[in-house]
């Protein structure tokens, strides 16, 4: 199984297996991220990525020692905000750009997980322009218009 396939599978499983209820710990996670990161900077970066990648894409943030192959799209200079949104020792982000479609409701999804492909707690930051909308509930909260925090858990 290829590395890219495992990462895509991990994102899919994490999103499908989102936990129920919003515990105190999850609210704390959102609060920590809000203190660490300026949501407007996240949104500005996401809007730029959406312009650069007008259709579905998986991106990889460069870090020393990353093993690449010719099919990988590497972000050679990822912004510090990507690192700052990782909390509780979670790995990530796994970066996915949503596909083009009939609507303009596109986003960049940033998955942070305890372990890619092996399950555990995690979170996804979904960021689009100010018109991007996502259904909110106990595990998905709006950070600012167009930017959302989603708690996920993969068994």
Image (cartoon, rainbow, N blue to C red):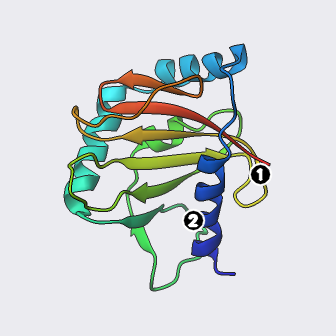
The relative height of residue 43 versus residue 64 in the rendered view (above or below) is above
Q: Name the one closer to the observer, 105 or 64.
A: 105
Q: Name the one closer to the observer, 129 or 13.
A: 13
Q: Around disc 2, counting alpha carbons within 10 Å, would you say few (fewer than 14), some (14 to 19), or many (20 or more)?
A: some
Q: CA distance from mark 2 to mark 1?
A: 13 Å
Q: Is residue 98 left or right of residue 14?
A: left
Q: Earlier in the sequence, mark 2 or mark 1?
A: 2
Q: Which residue is mark 1?
A: 119
The answer to whether one can see residue 85 in this image is: yes
Q: Is residue 36 left or right of residue 25?
A: left
Residue at the limit of the structure toward the bottom, as seen here: 70
The image shows residue 96 at horizontal and vertical percentages of 44, 58
Q: Around disc 1, counting alpha carbons within 10 Å, would you say few (fewer than 14), some (14 to 19), or many (20 or more)?
A: some
- Residue at horizontal 71%, vertical 18%? 23
The image shows residue 74 at horizontal and vertical percentages of 42, 68
Q: Which residue is mark 2?
A: 8
For label 1, the SS is loop
- Residue at horizontal 58%, vertical 69%? 66
Residue at the limit of the structure toward the top, as seen here: 24
**Residue 30 lies in quadrant:** top right
For label 2, the SS is helix
């Amino acid at each position: 199984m290829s590395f890219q396939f495992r990462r895509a599978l991990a994102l899919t499983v994490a999103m499908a297996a989102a936990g129920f209820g919003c515990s105190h710990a999850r609210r704390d996670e959102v609060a920590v991220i809000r203190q660490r990161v300026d949501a407007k900077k996240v949104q500005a970066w996401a809007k730029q990525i959406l312009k650069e990648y007008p259709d579905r894409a998986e991106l990889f943030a460069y870090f020393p020692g990353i093993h690449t192959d010719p099919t990988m799209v590497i972000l050679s200079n990822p912004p510090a905000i990507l690192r700052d949104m990782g909390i509780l020792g979670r790995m990530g982000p796994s970066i996915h750009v949503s596909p083009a479609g009939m609507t303009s409701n596109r986003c960049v999804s940033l998955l942070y997980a305890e372990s890619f492909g092996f399950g555990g707690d995690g979170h996804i930051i979904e960021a689009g322009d100010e018109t991007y909308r996502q259904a909110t509930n106990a595990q998905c909260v709006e950070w600012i218009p167009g930017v959302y925090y989603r708690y996920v858990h993969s068994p």
